[in-house]
């Protein structure tokens, strides 16, 4: 008899045995059996009885905000309205609006049309208002270098088809973001413009070019903006080949800059180029490349890598128990007047058992200011939660810093969260003067009732160095859902800072020592109205009746560069988050965002760093790939790292 015949016979015998058991007990009553005992969570795409099922899927968000801020003795008020809306149409794509209107007459507004279908399989994304200049994929898919986008008040358009062909163009007046809870956009004068195209000449290949111009604009971005006004023309060309386990991309860039709006070139043409490659060989991933940049390189009105040449190599190995990586960078000044750096890094982690892991790592930078850092840690999962003990040491020509930290993520009941961090440290300067430092941080929150929740984050540091310092930061947010569509939130924060950050060695580029002095206090009261209508069971990206889940997350400033949200680390507020290149939202004051109903399957979240404070940057547009399951909540944490 064949194997499938044996299986059928066994199944039949089992069914007969069950039938005999029921026949022997004819008094047994039938009972319904519920999946998971009837505890299955409802599909988030299901709507309540009073949900408006007519029309296209649509939503609106209105926030009335009043705030009182005080920084270093100066009082500031931010009062106004933040608004957002979208409608998903079958013929015109997704239309969305995002705006801020303050009582002092300032604000910003952006209108997007995403996924507009046109003939020939093309999809179009159009933007108007405060947005970032567009770029082809090749400018962003970089391992080590990238070309920055510029925030402008202007227009943007991007055309794509399924064959990998894309065109983009955009431009306007550059500017900077200001404000805390209600961001506004301040123009800097002049103009920038960009245009690009890419195509796929053969399977696995992608090639493209991008140009950017700037006319009579300040050079730099954010706090780095200088007084000099320049005009510039920049171009980029790149080609990439991607196989199953390999990717190689070559890039060329050039720029010409001149003072003000003067059409005559008073500075020469400058060029740069780099090659990035990635190779996966079994459990080992390799990435390596080489680069060269002339001095005074710019992209539009922003400075990019300049006066540098060299190469790098990285390798990582991952198994069920081991995670090992290491690499080396060599950076030399092209002119001989700048940097001459060799940087080496390495780390190893071993998961000894299900509940115990440990690791170590070190970074060494050899240059005019030779420096190193090293760390070792132990992770332990027990009844109380996840505990990490870590020892750090860092030293350069002017100081030495030691620190011992204990992080604890506590096991809490459903609906609550709590993590704490305690650290002690000692810093010694080049004159032999030492000082001790102790720090405590806490992050947590939970649902007080079904309608009221609270979240808080606090950090306190005391140092008895040459200048005795006590620093503290705290914020607390209370949210109260008054009705299904109406919520009230109250946020209070206080920041007292008079210190520089502990010494860190995390990149080939020496990090500047920044001394901060803040006396901040803020109070925000927000009344938020949310409404959603349309085909009740049509989640984002799906059709009526499709199963859906929830996507939520946080964008945060990763102070210790461990890609984990720790106690004392702050969220990035008012940052634009895009789901699948089509659906847009912004982070709240805690850096959190949410898409409440998303079709099951694979999705991509990207971030536009339009309001991210310097020196923080996002790698690869903060891209995060995730899988959404029906009736589930998918969380994603996106770290911002210090500029390297």
Image (cartoon, rainbow, N blue to C red):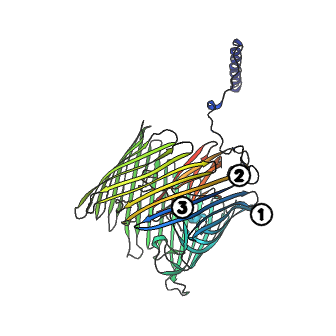
Task: Looking at the image, tell me whether mark 3 or mark 2 is earlier in sequence order.
Answer: 3
Q: Is mark 2 on a helix, strand or loop?
A: strand
| Labels 2, 1: front one | 2
Mark 3 to mark 1 CA distance (whole Å): 47 Å
Q: Nearer the viewer, residue 333 or 476?
A: 476
Which numbered tag is attached to residue 66? 3
In what quadrant of the picture does the N terminus appear?
top right
Seen at 60% across and 54% down, the residue is: 604
Task: Looking at the image, tell me whether mark 3 or mark 1 is earlier in sequence order.
Answer: 3
Q: Is residue 217 visible?
A: yes
Looking at the image, do the residues carrying marks 2 and 1 touch, with CB atoms under 8 Å apart? Answer: no
Mark 3 to mark 2 CA distance (whole Å): 28 Å
| Labels 3, 1: front one | 3
Q: Is residue 557 visible?
A: no
Q: In this view, does 70 lie above or below 283?
A: below
Q: Is residue 405 above or below residue 525?
A: above
Label 1 neighbourhood size at 10 Å, few (<14), some (14-19), many (20+)?
A: few
Q: Is residue 433 above or below residue 18?
A: below
Residue 372 rendering spot, x and y as whole percentages: 33, 59
Q: In which quarter of the image is residue 103?
A: bottom right
Label 3 neighbourhood size at 10 Å, few (<14), some (14-19), many (20+)?
A: many
Q: Name the residue under label 2.
A: 533
Numbered disc total? 3
Seen at 42% across and 74% down, the residue is: 334
Q: Name the residue under label 1.
A: 119
Which residue extends farthest top? 24
| Labels 3, 2: front one | 3
Residue 199 rendering spot, x and y as whole percentages: 66, 65
Residue 436 rendering spot, x and y as whole percentages: 27, 55
Q: What element carries label 1?
A: helix
Looking at the image, do the residues carrying marks 3 and 1 touch, with CB atoms under 8 Å apart? Answer: no
Mark 2 to mark 1 CA distance (whole Å): 29 Å
């Amino acid at each position: 008899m064949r194997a499938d015949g044996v299986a059928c016979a066994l199944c039949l015998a089992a069914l007969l045995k069950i039938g005999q058991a029921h026949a022997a007990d004819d008094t047994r009553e039938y009972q319904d059996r519920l999946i998971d005992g009837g505890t299955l969570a409802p599909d988030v795409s299901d709507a309540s009885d009073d949900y408006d099922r007519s029309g296209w899927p649509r939503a609106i968000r209105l926030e009335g905000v009043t705030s009182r801020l005080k920084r270093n003795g100066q009082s500031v008020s931010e009062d106004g309205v933040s608004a957002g809306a979208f409608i998903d149409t079958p013929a015109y794509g997704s239309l969305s609006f995002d705006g801020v209107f303050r009582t002092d007459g300032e604000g910003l507004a952006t209108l997007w049309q995403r996924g507009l279908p046109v003939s020939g399989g093309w999809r179009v994304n159009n933007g108007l208002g405060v947005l970032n200049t567009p770029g082809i994929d090749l400018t962003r898919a970089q391992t080590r270098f990238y070309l920055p986008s510029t925030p402008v008040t202007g227009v943007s358009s991007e055309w794509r088809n399924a064959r990998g062909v894309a065109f983009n163009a955009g431009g306007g007046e550059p500017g900077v973001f200001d404000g805390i809870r209600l961001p506004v956009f301040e123009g800097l004068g002049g103009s920038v413009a960009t245009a690009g195209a890419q195509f796929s000449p053969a399977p696995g290949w992608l090639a493209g070019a991008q140009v950017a111009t700037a006319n009579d604009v300040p050079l730099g971005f954010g706090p780095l903006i200088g007084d000099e006004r320049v005009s510039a023309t920049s171009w980029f060309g790149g080609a990439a080949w991607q196989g199953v386990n390999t990717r190689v991309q070559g890039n060329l860039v050039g720029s010409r800059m001149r003072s003000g709006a003067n059409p005559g070139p008073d500075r020469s043409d400058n060029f740069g180029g780099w090659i990035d490659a990635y190779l996966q060989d079994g459990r080992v991933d390799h990435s390596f490349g080489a680069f060269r940049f002339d001095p005074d390189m710019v992209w539009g009105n922003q400075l990019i890598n300049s006066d540098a040449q060299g190469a790098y190599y990285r390798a990582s190995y991952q198994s069920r128990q081991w995670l090992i990586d290491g690499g080396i960078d060599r950076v030399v000044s092209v002119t001989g007047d700048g940097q001459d750096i060799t940087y080496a890094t390495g780390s190893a982690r071993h998961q000894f058992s299900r509940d115990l892991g440990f690791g170590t790592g070190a970074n060494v930078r050899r240059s005019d200011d030779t420096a190193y850092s090293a760390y070792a840690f132990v992770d332990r999962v027990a009844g109380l939660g996840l505990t990490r003990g870590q020892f750090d040491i860092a030293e350069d020509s002017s100081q030495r810093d030691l620190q011992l930290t204990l992080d604890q993520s506590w096991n809490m009941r459903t609906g609550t969260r709590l993590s704490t961090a305690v650290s002690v440290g000692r810093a010694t300067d080049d004159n032999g003067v030492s000082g001790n430092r102790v720090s405590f941080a806490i992050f947590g929150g939970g649902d007080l009732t079904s309608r009221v929740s609270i979240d808080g984050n606090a950090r306190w540091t005391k140092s008895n160095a040459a200048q005795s310092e006590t620093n503290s930061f705290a914020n607390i947010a209370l949210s109260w859902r008054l009705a299904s569509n109406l919520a009230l939130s109250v946020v209070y924060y206080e920041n007292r800072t008079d210190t520089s950050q502990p010494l860190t060695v995390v990149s080939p580029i020496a990090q500047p020592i920044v001394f901060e002095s803040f006396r901040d206090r803020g109070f925000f009261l927000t009344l938020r109205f949310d409404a959603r209508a349309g085909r009740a069971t049509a989640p984002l990206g799906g059709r009526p009746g499709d199963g859906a889940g929830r996507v939520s997350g946080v964008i945060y400033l990763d102070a210790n560069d461990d890609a984990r949200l720790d106690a004392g680390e702050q969220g990035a507020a008012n940052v634009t988050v895009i789901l699948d290149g089509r659906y847009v939202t912004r982070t709240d004051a805690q850096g959190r965002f949410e898409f409440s109903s998303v079709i099951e399957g694979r999705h991509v979240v990207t971030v536009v760093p339009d309001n991210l404070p310097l020196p923080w940057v996002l790698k690869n547009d903060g891209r995060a790939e995730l899988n959404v399951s029906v009736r589930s909540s998918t969380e994603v944490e996106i770290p911002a790292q210090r500029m390297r």
